[in-house]
Amino acid sequence: MEYIIQQWWTPLLFILFVFDLVMKGFALWKAARNNHLAWFICIIVLNTAGILPIIYLLTNKAQTKE
């Protein structure tokens, strides 16, 4: 029974890892461009499975610094 659970659990973890990596990278890039040091530090330190980067991206989507 454990082997059957492990078969679907591994791809799910991989998808979650890739999603978190993409969201974190994009949010860190936007936070650095907008000079949001507190957000940058929180996103890089806390491991929230993509939730904190999504919150940052949604709350700061109107702020772009050219």
Image (cartoon, rainbow, N blue to C red):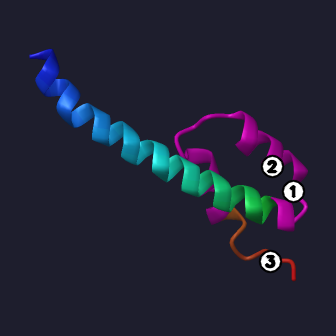
Name the residue at 15% across, 21% down.
3
Q: Which residue is drawn at 19% across and 32% down?
A: 7
Q: Residue 48 carries which label?
A: none
Q: Say what secondary structure mark 1 lies in.
A: loop
Q: Which of 30 and 58 is in front in this view?
A: 30
Q: Which amino acid does label 1 sit on?
A: His
According to the picture, the residue beneath numbered tag 1 turns out to be 36
Q: Does the magenta stretch include residue 27?
A: no
What separation in Å lies between label 2 and label 1 (alpha carbons)? 6 Å
> Which of marks 3 and 2 precedes in the sequence?
2
Instruction: Examine the residues drawn in magenta and state their main secondary structure.
Output: helix
Q: Can residue 56 be seen in this view?
A: no
Quarter of the picture holding the N terminus: top left
Looking at the image, residue 56 sits to the left or right of residue 13; the answer is right
27 vs 14: above or below: below
The reply to whether callout 2 and callout 1 are in contact (CB within 8 Å) is yes
Residue 33 position, x and y percent, is: 85, 67
Mark closer to the chain start, 1 or 3: 1
As helix, strand or loop, the secondary structure at mark 3 comes to: loop
Up the image or down, 42 lies above or below 2; here it is: below
Type of amino acid under label 2: Phe
Dot 1 and dot 3 residues touching (CB under 8 Å):
no
Q: Measure how far apart labels 2 and 3 are at the Cα level.
A: 15 Å
Quick check: is 34 in the magenta stretch? Answer: yes
Disc assigned to residue 40: 2
How busy is the neighbourhood of tag 1: few (under 14 within 10 Å), some, or many (20 plus)? few
Q: Which residue is the site of mark 3?
A: 64
Where residue 52 appears, x then y in whole percent? Answer: 62, 46
Q: How far apart are marks 1 and 3 (CA)?
A: 12 Å
Q: Quadrant of residue 34?
A: bottom right
Image location of residue 48, percent across then percent down: 57, 37
